[in-house]
Amino acid sequence: MFAKSFQKNKKLEEQKEFTLKNLGGKNNYAQISNRAEHVCVLPSPWGPCQQQREEEESQRRKSENNAAADMDLRSELLKSIWYGFSALDLEKSGKVSKSQLKVLSHNLCTVLSIPHDPVALEEHFRDDDDGPVSSQGYMPYLNKYILDKVVEGSFQKENVDELCWTLTAKKNYQPKKNSSFVLPDKDAFRLWCLFNFLSEDKYPLVMVPDEVEYLLKKMCTAMSIEFCGVELEDFFSQDSVQQSGITVWTFLEMMNSGKITRGIEMGIISMAIEEVYREIVGDVLKEGYLWKKGQLRRNWKERWFTLRPSNLSYYTGEDRKDCQGNIALDGNCCVEVLPDRDGKRCMFCLKTLSKTYEMSASDTKQRQEWTAAIQTAIRLHVEGKKSLHKDLKQKRREQREQREKRKQAKEEELQRLRALQEERERKLAELELLKEAQKQAQSLLEKDEQRRRQQHEQLQQALEVQLREAEEARVSMQAEMALKEEEAERQRKRIQELEEMQKRLEEALQQEIKARLDEEAFRYAQAGLLAEEEDKMKALMSLQEEQEEYILKTEREKQELKQEMEAKSRSLEEAQRQLEEVRANRHRVDQDVVAAQRKLRQASTNVKHWNVQMNRLMRPIGPGEKRPSLGSSYSSFQIPTQRDPGLRLRRRSDSENQDEERKENVEKRAGNDLEKRHSHCSNGDMNIP
């Protein structure tokens, strides 16, 4: 009855877990409600920002992981408590007295570090004062007043296991004292804890053969021996009931029999059991000695390291009594391999947000194992998982379920094949009957064949008569076909002549179309050339206007320069009267004169450049114009008319060139006069005493 209640409680827990996952856990549900109220009073209609939603999503995931961890812890505690309750049920009726439950509840509250309320137990079972309390009545109390108050990390689960083991071992575990191979109580307790960890979540608790084999392989690996599955197969083959799973007492009896660990010392077996227990139940991913570099003194010391999914602890020795430090692992941690230095080899480091821990292993294999184990621990912490072997157990369970499904599918396939075989045999019997019927039908067919032969001979004679008539008709048809062939030959020749005529007409049509297209293209090209010539004329006229403006500007600058030169001449005349002043200002006047000459030369150069450009642009190219060859006669030259725009532009450019030449002559004469004056001034200066 207690097993049924535990299964019922398991279903309730699964429903609760499913509800918590959908709502994001109890705490998260409250947060969602508070957030909804907070959103209602916001003045802005846009709701919370993206960062707040991301924080709520991360909080929801953490709540889901915490809820799943709470459910796993509850399930593990229920397995141990189930043994304690079953030990108190001496009559195996599923009922335990209230006094025994009080003692059990008090002890559970003590080891779980929660306050015990005996009054609540009395009020919960006040209707059952006359008789023992059933498991259906104790389970709600256990969930409400004990398991719901459990806080992970506030108690040692090993103490709970020891309490339940003490209760159940007195009744169920009674090894033979005179046997040569008996496990110590500590090893039996650890095997019991390993059994509970690897057992199925169904009551009564059993461990399937695959998990038994997995546990024995882990123990053999710890003892550095090869596992032989023959004894295990013989053990399971003795009883067909055990193939679906064995109880913990059967498992301990098998271990005490010595068949699996034959020829191995008890000390080695105990060490292997302890190592496997710490790895699976204690969530120890790896243990061993490493050299660690200090943070302050920077010296190297050998420490015993213990790696779990949440932290990396190191002690002074293997007894793990003096803890020297604890390194918390999270998603921000990483492990890196370091080169050999400081006389240490096989080095690696563990980086956290605040510190970097440098360590050295004994060999490359140990360094690889440690780095892989630390990376596994970081991955488990990032994924929100607290135990590697719980995850592996779940994966093995899923693989077994898949194998069961495949096995069931194979059985269904075999049943279908058997049905097909039966159907085939039935069809073979029907086929034999059909063969008998076929023989009878064959005799009837032979009789019908004879009758058909007679009818065939009669039909053949009639067909011969019809064949002769058809031959005569064929001869007449051949003569008629010959006449039709001659007529058809004449028609074919006529058609060929018409086709040739059609081809010639099509070629003539294509030539005419091509000529028209060429003419149209020539017209378009001529129109484009005329438009281009008109654009060039417009550009040329605009350039001419700009040149005229520039010439006027140059004339104004020349007038200003002449005035300046006259002023300088007057200053030179005055300098003859005032010799001291001329000597002081002579150098400045010389520089001004040189700058003026440079400006004049630059202006003349610019004017020549523009004249060259104008001469090049004064000759527009007419449409269809070609350059005359060197051997052409003088008669091909034609005098341009007065209306030719190119002739007008050339005349204008010639007149402008003549003006420019006159201006250059004037500038040269002015420059010569200026040089003469300078020479006179310099001579006058030299003659003055």
Image (cartoon, rainbow, N blue to C red):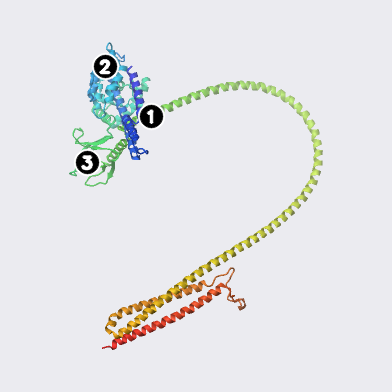
Q: Which residue is mark 2?
A: 123
Q: Which mark is residue 292?
A: 3
Earlier sequence position, callout 2 versus callout 3: 2
Is 348 rendered above or below residue 421?
Answer: below
Q: Which callout, 1 or 2, points to the residue nearer the camera?
A: 2
Where is residue 157? Give x, y as percent.
25, 27
Where is residue 226? Give x, y as percent.
31, 31
Q: Which callout, 2 or 3, points to the residue nearer the camera?
A: 2
Viewer-proximal residue among 407 and 34:
34
Viewer-proximal residue among 420 and 227:
420
**Amino acid, disc 3:** Lys
In this picture, residue 306 sits left or right of residue 212 = left
**Amino acid, disc 2:** Glu
Residue at the location (37% across, 80% down)? 565
Viewer-proximal residue among 243 and 446:
243
Residue 175 in view here:
no
Residue at the location (27% across, 23% down)? 146
Quarter of the image where the C terminus is located: bottom left
Quarter of the image where the N terminus is located: top left
Q: Residues within 10 Å of mark 3 (few under 14, many from 20)?
A: many
Q: Which residue is mark 1?
A: 398
In this picture, residue 117 sits left or right of residue 555 = left
Secondary structure found at label 1 = helix
The answer to which quarter of the image holds residue 665 is bottom left
Earlier sequence position, callout 1 versus callout 2: 2
Do residues under tags 1 and 3 come within 8 Å of each other at their CB atoms?
no
In the rendered image, the residue lying farthest to the left is 297
Where is residue 469? Give x, y as percent.
81, 36
